[in-house]
Amino acid sequence: MTCGFSASTPDAENSLKKSVGEVVAIAKDSKSSSGLSESLRPVLMKSISFDAMTRRAIGPGWRQFTEAQQKEATRLFTTLIIRTYSSKFTPGELPEISYKTARCPEPGRVEIATSTLYRGSQYEVIYRLEDTGGWRITDVVIEGASLVANYRTQFDAAFKEGGVDAVMNALKKSASQSTE
Amino acid sequence: MRQSIAFWTTLVAAFFCSRAGFASDQTALNSQIVIIREDRAKPAPLTKNGTPKNSNETLFLRTAVKEVPLAPSPQEKKKPLKTSLAAPQSNSRKPTPKPTKPTQKNADTNKNDTIKITKISQPVSNDDLDEYSDIAKIADPAEPINRCTFWLNHQLYNYVLRPISNVYEFVLPRPARNAVHNVFDNAEYPVRVVNHALQFEFKRADLETRKFFVNSVAGIGGILKVSDKIPALSNIPSADTAQTFAKWGIGHGAYVVLPVLGPRSVRDTVGMAGDYALNPISWLSYGGVGGATTLAISGPSAAQNMNERIRIYDSATKNAIDPYIAVRTGYVQYRDQAASK
């Protein structure tokens, strides 16, 4: 099935499986959760479209950011996302993931639902990918809770309260917090 | 007399000139203002009094309608769309509208089409909004009180329940914890089966019954979750009373943060009472078994639940911009999804 502009849905599935496989392999070898986010960073940097994630998480207010602020916001949000994603893993506890048939909501986009057995519980995790010259993850939806949409509501509230400055300050504060 | 004729000539000439000028302005104005009909920008049917009577058309400046090429550059492949409303800012980032499901045929045959309008009801339609423009929302009229309760719960989780949970995890190894969880999960079968039936999901009620018997008999009273090995029984959507209310069309109602228990909507709080009534463990209280014994029996389940809840709570709040909003949004998204299954 052709879903992207140049690539096909199986390409998206293979790309996701490869990325998730690498993440699981790193989480398996990790001794503690504190260093896990830094170990996962290189894999996540190439598998996730942090630009798109940041832009959508911040929402319409994004266009009021200067180019420098957009870059800084993306850098800080990348740190938050990597930490959030890494915190889902407990060293030594590996998920059993079964992939379902991919869905193509529109050209250039694929949603791949998975059923993940982790720590004795079943979770439905949907990965949203986009073809940006290669398939990259743009959102992860765990049991209906979208990572991007969740941050969107938080940024919306900050933006309404104090505009760009409030969003940037909130990002800096959250990114500088210790993960422990 | 001659002066009088000149005066009137000038006056009449000025009148006609002004009319001609008006007409000229009117024509220019008409060409600048467009309406959007059938995905195309068309000149607005303006009269000298403005819009035609009873017209409810939305008017746009032609300059506000911006062309977006159909064939995107390799860097911007994703949005093969057509025309959007131009962003008012001078920002270099160009808005990329969400496609309106273009077919391959359209993409091939309309490559030279440049004026096609997509989201006309949205003054700003672009990638920033995307599918997240319709984020799950819930009324939160008691937000100040809820934030206060949220803060108190946060202290309780961190300084009281987390240590208890850690002790439970330390004392009981994972297989034992799983066994406790399985037994209590199995015992909650009436909650699920009754609610499946109330939701007219009789197939699921049937599967749930089979699962209960398989786990009770082959799984030694539910200690082992044998049903996980049977594909048809391994992933039956859960059902509870609040979910039944949702399927009956009852909305969330207001958001409330309950002491200790955490986030709920009014609907889910009422539903919780229904689940309690359907849960066999709670029946013990009415069957002559003392409250302390009931508490002792349900204790491991509570600890197991607490353990999982704290893990999910940490995951939602640790890297949040505003933990209160993060939990509220996560809760509503989760419940909406559960109700849609």
Image (cartoon, rainbow, N blue to C red):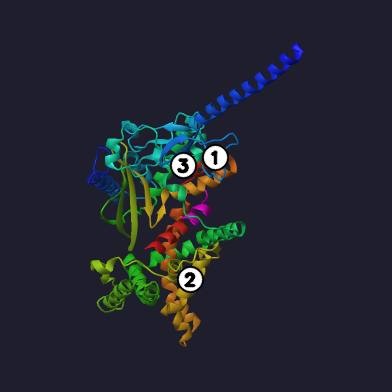
Q: CA distance from mark 3 to mark 2?
A: 41 Å
Residue B16 colored in magenta in the image: no
Q: Could you tell me the amino acid type at mark 2?
A: Gly
Identify residue for label 3.
Answer: B120
Residue B272 placement (x, y as % from top left) = 48, 71
Q: Are marks 3 and 2 in contact (CB under 8 Å)?
A: no
Q: Position of residue B159 (x, y in %)?
A: 52, 60
Q: Do tag 1 and tag 3 residues touch (Cβ < 8 Å)?
A: no
As helix, strand or loop, the secondary structure at mark 3 comes to loop
**What type is the residue that disc 1 sits on?**
Asn
Q: Position of residue B130 (x, y in %)?
A: 42, 44
Crowd band around label 2 with a 10 angstrom C-alpha radius: few (<14), some (14–19), many (20+): many
In the rendering, which numbered label is found on residue B271?
2
Tag 2, which chain? B
Say if residue B281 shows up in the picture.
Answer: yes
Name the side, left or right, on which B121 lies relative to B218.
right
